[in-house]
Amino acid sequence: MKMLTGFVPAIVLITLSTHPAVAAVSTLIGNGIAGFSDIQVNNPYGLVLGPDGALYFCDLDNQRIRRLDLATRRVATIAGNGERGYRGDGGPAVNAALNMPHELRFDSRGDLYIAERDNHVVRKVDMKSGVISTVAGTGTAGFGGDGGPGVKALLRQPHSIIFDRNGDLLICDIGNQRIRRLHLGTGVIETYAGTGEAKPTREGSAVAGTPLKGPRTLASAPNGDLYLALREGNAIYRIDAKTQTLHRVAGTGEQGYAGDGGAALNAKLAGPKGLAYAPGDILYIADTENHAIRSVNLKTGVITTVLGTGVRGDGPEADPLGCKLSRPHGVLFANGALYVADSEAHRIRVLR
């Protein structure tokens, strides 16, 4: 597969520590100006670490999926030709047209899946051949197809995807107020959660048949539990793997920016759009409209801000609590660091 390569000189790092005074944030790629080059990104969103140890990310307004080698700092395009559209299935992913790729995940075989919001599809890149194909959605917005092939089903603005512990693909079908489940073995799709109604989620209710208000993104814990961010619901819920019930862990449901140092259940969030689970039972939240990254200690239930000021901006680095962000969307914990897609600052930052 042909890739575009180049050298990435800009690096921003944030180091996480038990002593906040030694934490530091820096830029991994991006110079604050939207563009497409070896040192520029244009509204980065979803982040994932590949099986090869490289960082893959959705370069949203460049309509591309890009790869950053963390050892050599070389950047390459994996999918997308920069054209906004829905074309290219059956051919090289680098020649395909994408339409607002929001999030990406690797399956157990090492193939890459992409949620494309405005194509209303989920696509797959075979990483051995470089060929792209559609696995769910038809390219037309709507709701339908449960119980049948995913490629004939209708989605509406899928934002986020994740693999559950059974290897099935969960899709945050946010325009339909549902989470859909694609069984990769059979190709069959179904509704896993949500009713299509944007109503409050009842504490302790069963996943099946319970309303969800803006199911935006998912993260998984080692025990199989899932964490769900509700964008319009301004809350984070845990889906218990054993009981398949919903339990609120952060956010009152009221939009705002409050609660640091106290119980996450009493805190206010504003449009959370990214989640990342970290060892030690820490959940990181991209509190997007608050321009901050917050963490919840799932053992104590306490919430704190780890990056950002609550005011929109771009830096300065390196003090995490003095560094302004601009609508961050993606968060990823890997290699002992927190990677942040600081979307409208056109940077990917790292907190160590």
Image (spheres, rainbow, N blue to C red):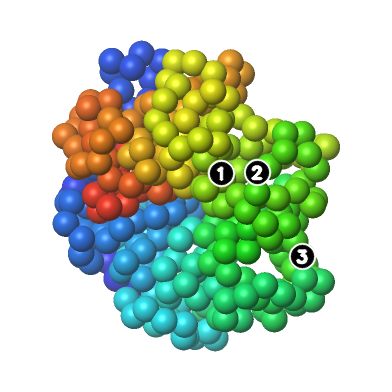
* Circle 3: element type: strand
* Circle 2: element type: loop
Amino acid type of the residue tagged 3 in the rendering: Glu
Mark closest to the chain's N terminus, 3 or 2: 3
The residue carrying pointer 1 sits among few (fewer than 14), some (14 to 19) or many (20 or more) residues within 10 Å by Cα, namely many
Amino acid type of the residue tagged 1 in the rendering: Gly
Residues 218 and 129: in front is: 218
Residue 301 figure quarter = top right
Q: Give the position of the C terminus as an image quadrant.
A: top left
Percent x, y of residue 157: 53, 67
Q: Relative to 44, does residue 255 appear above or below in the rendering?
A: above
Of circles 1 and 3, which is in front? 1
Percent x, y of residue 77: 35, 68
The numbered disc on residue 233 is 1
> At 65% from the left edge and 49% from the top edge, which residue is drawn?
199
Q: Which residue is mark 2?
A: 200
**Mark 1 touches mark 3? (CB < 8 Å):** no
